[in-house]
Amino acid sequence: MDTQAGPDLEVIYAPVQPDVSRLHEFLREEFCAPEALIHEILQHVARFRGKQMRPAMLFLAGRLGGQECTSDHVKIGAVVELIHTATLVHDDVLDDALMRRNVETVHRLWGERAAVLIGDYIYSRAFQLSTEVDGMASILSETTHTICEGELLQLRNRFCPDMGENTYLEIIAKKTAILYAISCMLGGRLGGLNRDECDLLREFGLDLGMAFQIVDDCLDYVGTESEAGKSLGTDLHQNKVTLPLIYLMESLSSSDATWVKEQLRSPLSRESESRIQTLVDQHGVVPACLDRAEAFVRTARERLAQIDDHCVSGSIVRDRLDLVGDYILRRQR
């Protein structure tokens, strides 16, 4: 995998750094609670917060029309980040992951019940906040509904080695890319862009989200946990068929493909996991997957180019949104 450093996030975020700082202050309050146990767990979950790319993209999209971001932008950016954080907590339970952002996962420290409940707690707070900005609650609740559909679709296809690329793309569109799409679309909407421009921003975000998840699925096979800051190898261990496995089975001989499919129909032994990992390495399928991610980034850029420059600052912001694609393709974490 090409590990060349991508654009520095400080460069990408520069036009909206004041908004990102306001978001940090807002979220600091959200990860507090009067009840001691809830507060303790929330403070731990707050350490999961990473680059906050989705709210940053919302802020960038919000400035495309030349307007300053308002408190509504910050509040909806926080909602997006809270929804994302809740999904991480729940995902770690589903994957039995040990690490997230180089700290232990919630269910490892407090148990699965506490992890599920704190995820629900964060979701409910996100929905409450969304009602405070006109027109946002229905969109964001529908988004969360779509994320859950994606997770359930992935769960249904566990132990299904014949799952094709189209189903895989549907899963990642629903469980990951939708939140990028909505972030960009809502940013444009709050920033006063017209409906066509907001629709383009939605598709732009969706394409970048697809690329992000494909790269993430590749890192599960070729990344290192010290770089990724989370448990890796969980997809194969959980019998999840992602793009590297789909491309692997297309490249294998009939007998080897049959063997891999037979192994994936039930929990894998360590020996089977190791052999499949070796086949992934030998057949070079990860570069082909990254090519697919790059194609999504190219399409995203084509959509972004269709949005008119409303002002000089809008052009600068659009350049920064364009750089997000480079960052996604070259990220290591």
Image (tube, rainbow, N blue to C red):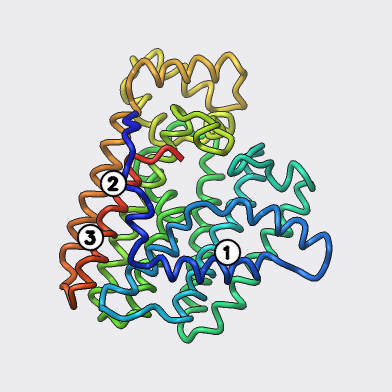
| Circle nearer the N terminus (3, 2) | 3
Q: Nearer the viewer, mark 1 or mark 2?
A: 2
Residue sitting farthest toward the bottom: 134
Q: In the rendering, at what x and y percent does residue 7 appear?
A: 31, 47
* Circle 2 residues within 10 Å: few <14, some 14–19, many ≥20: some
Label 2 element class: helix
Q: Nearer the viewer, mark 1 or mark 3?
A: 3
Which three-letter amino acid code belongs to the residue tagged 1?
Leu
The answer to whether residue 53 is left or right of residue 330 is: right
Q: Mark 3, residues whose alpha carbon is within 10 Å: few (<14), some, or many (≥20)?
A: some
Q: Mark 3 to mark 2: distance in Å? A: 11 Å
Q: Which mark is residue 319?
A: 3
Q: Specify the label residue 326 is tagged with.
A: 2
The residue at which mark 1 appears reads as 82
Pinpoint residue 138: horizontal percent, then vertical percent.
Answer: 50, 78
Q: Identify the residue at image location x=35%, y=62%.
A: 14
Task: Determine the secondary structure under disc 1.
Answer: helix
- Asked whether, in this view, residue 305 is left or right of residue 278, the answer is left
Q: Residue at x 54, y 58 (%)?
A: 84
Q: CA distance from mark 1 to mark 2?
A: 25 Å
